């Protein structure tokens, strides 16, 4: 039985939750795993007409019988974790089992404080973070002053680690940002308050997942953020602090790359981006406004408006190559109904030179101008289509053209937010 990766092939918000939910409901997924990011992610799932938003929790949490795993590559805010769990419990829905890695790093209160004051200090040079402490927690992990989930259960070790982490941060807060120092005691007390509830969920998740694969169980690795936000392969420095590409799944879970069978990239029928950074196909006209309005393009976790633009086949080819995608899942095809012509970016013009692949440097990417092909549009409502043949001919041609341009076959196409509004193209 397979290990499957589902990840974002653009700048996030592609509808990964829909793809994950489809797999967990139709293909009997036993484990749904998050391997990177924190509660800055957001997945929207519609079940029986009810809309659910998950942030830190894997989408599989809404599937009874599926074990959801927050693996070692994730940074965890205990407060955000239990707030999200409690919100689901209040809605009286049946949840699957949740397991948390003992080696996952913890977001403490000082991480979000540092995140917010640093962004304000940077002014016009800000990165556009969510201010939730994700980057500072990952920085502490790399600087070897981070706190792991297992540390919450040993008060002496926790106190020593918090003290070491605050030694430099308090100088920064008081002398640079003119903020008050944070005491070791208040941080330890806050983190320890979650220990009793968290401890029954904690396991060696690498061992758990490898044994599951040995036993023939199916494991789905669910991406957060997306390829173009990867700290190595994205539009640096306007990126996240982790590795949401396929290679990050192995380091973020302790499951080797040779065990992965499918890598599915989720991509919108157009493109969106939240936060700062280059975006070649971004629209500032009535078409951009229409995509934003019809697509409901507001961030699930951030509440920020998404920047909107046409489909970028250069980005799609890049994501296919970087991740070794075996297939693509395209969402929101229904949003494009009513355009007479639908532009698709097939290459870039950089200072008069055509680039069919990603430019070499970030400076060139900032200057990239889209080269468009205009495909025939359609006026019909797609929300009721349930097979590829149900789609209008021009919508079929649009899907086929994008598949040819993008470097990977299209596994499925979404024509609405509901579970049932998905058309399998290459099953």
Image (spheres, helix red, strand yellow):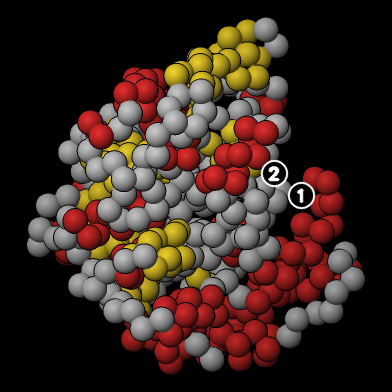
Answer above or below: position of 74 versus 65.
Answer: above
Secondary structure category for the residue under label 2: loop
Q: Is residue 280 left or right of residue 179?
A: left
Residue 52 rendering spot, x and y as whole percentages = 43, 67
Q: Nearer the viewer, residue 346 or 368?
A: 346
**Neighbour class for label 2 at 10 Å: few (<14), some, many (≥20)?**
some
Residue 302 rendering spot, x and y as whole percentages = 61, 60
Inter-mark Cα distance, 2 to 1: 8 Å
Residue at 51% x, 15% y is 373
Residue at the front extreme? 380
Q: Is residue 299 left or right of residue 100?
A: right
Q: Give the number of the disc on residue 211.
A: none
Answer above or below: position of 206 versus 316.
Answer: below
Answer above or below: position of 50 versus 304.
Answer: below
Q: To which quarter of the image does residue 408 belong? A: top left
Answer above or below: position of 273 versus 76.
Answer: above
Residue at 29% x, 79% y is 94
Q: To which quarter of the image does residue 181 belong? A: bottom right
Q: Nearer the viewer, residue 229 or 337?
A: 337
Residue 4 rendering spot, x and y as whole percentages = 25, 49
Residue at 67% x, 69% y is 112
Could you tell me if the residues under marks 2 and 1 are in contact, i.e. CB atoms within 8 Å?
yes
Q: Give the number of the disc on residue 126.
A: 1
Q: Give the residue number, with chain letter if any, for mark 2.
A: 276
Judge depth for marks 2 and 1 and give the one in front. 2
Q: Nearer the viewer, residue 363 or 104?
A: 363
* Picture quarter with the C terminus: top left
Residue at 40% x, 34% y is 380
């Amino acid at each position: 039985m397979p290990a499957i990766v589902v990840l974002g092939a653009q700048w996030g918000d592609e509808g990964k939750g829909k793809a994950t939910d489809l797999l967990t409901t139709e293909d009997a997924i036993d484990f749904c795993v998050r391997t990177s990011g924190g509660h800055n992610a957001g997945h929207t799932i519609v079940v029986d007409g009810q809309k659910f938003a998950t942030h830190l929790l894997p989408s599989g949490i809404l599937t009874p019988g599926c074990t959801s795993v927050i693996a070692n590559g994730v940074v965890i805010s205990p407060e955000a974790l239990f707030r999200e769990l409690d919100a689901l419990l209040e809605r009286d829905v049946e949840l699957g089992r949740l397991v948390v890695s003992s080696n996952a790093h913890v977001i403490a209160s000082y991480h979000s404080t540092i995140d917010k004051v640093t962004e304000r200090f940077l002014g016009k040079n800000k990165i556009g973070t969510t201010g939730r402490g994700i980057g500072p927690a990952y920085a502490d992990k790399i600087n070897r002053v981070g706190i792991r989930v297992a540390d919450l259960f040993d008060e002496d070790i926790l106190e020593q680690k918090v003290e070491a982490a605050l030694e430099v941060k308090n100088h920064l807060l008081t002398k640079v940002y003119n903020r008050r120092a944070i005491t070791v005691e208040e941080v330890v007390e806050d983190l320890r308050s979650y220990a009793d509830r968290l401890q029954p969920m904690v396991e060696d998740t690498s061992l758990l997942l490898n044994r599951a694969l040995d036993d023939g169980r199916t494991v789905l690795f669910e991406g957060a953020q997306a390829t173009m936000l990867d700290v190595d392969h994205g539009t640096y420095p306007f990126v996240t602090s982790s590795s949401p590409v396929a290679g990050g799944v192995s380091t973020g879970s302790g499951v080797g790359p040779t065990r992965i069978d499918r890598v599915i990239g989720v991509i919108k029928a157009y493109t969106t981006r939240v936060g700062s950074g280059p975006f070649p196909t971004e629209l500032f006209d009535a078409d951009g406004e229409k995509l934003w309005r019809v697509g409901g393009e507001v961030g699930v976790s951030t509440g920020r408006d998404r920047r909107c633009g046409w489909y970028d086949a250069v980005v799609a080819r890049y994501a296919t190559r970087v991740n070794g995608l075996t297939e693509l899942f395209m969402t929101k095809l229904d949003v494009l109904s009513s355009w007479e012509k639908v532009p698709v970016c097939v290459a870039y013009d950089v200072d008069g030179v055509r680039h069919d692949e990603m430019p070499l440097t970030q400076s060139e990417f900032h200057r990239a101008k889209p080269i468009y092909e205009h495909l025939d549009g359609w006026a019909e409502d797609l929300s009721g289509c349930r097979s590829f043949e149900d789609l209008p001919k021009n919508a079929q041609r649009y899907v086929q053209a994008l598949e040819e341009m993008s470097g990977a076959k299209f596994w499925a196409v979404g024509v609405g937010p509901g579970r049932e509004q998905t058309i399998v193209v290459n099953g």
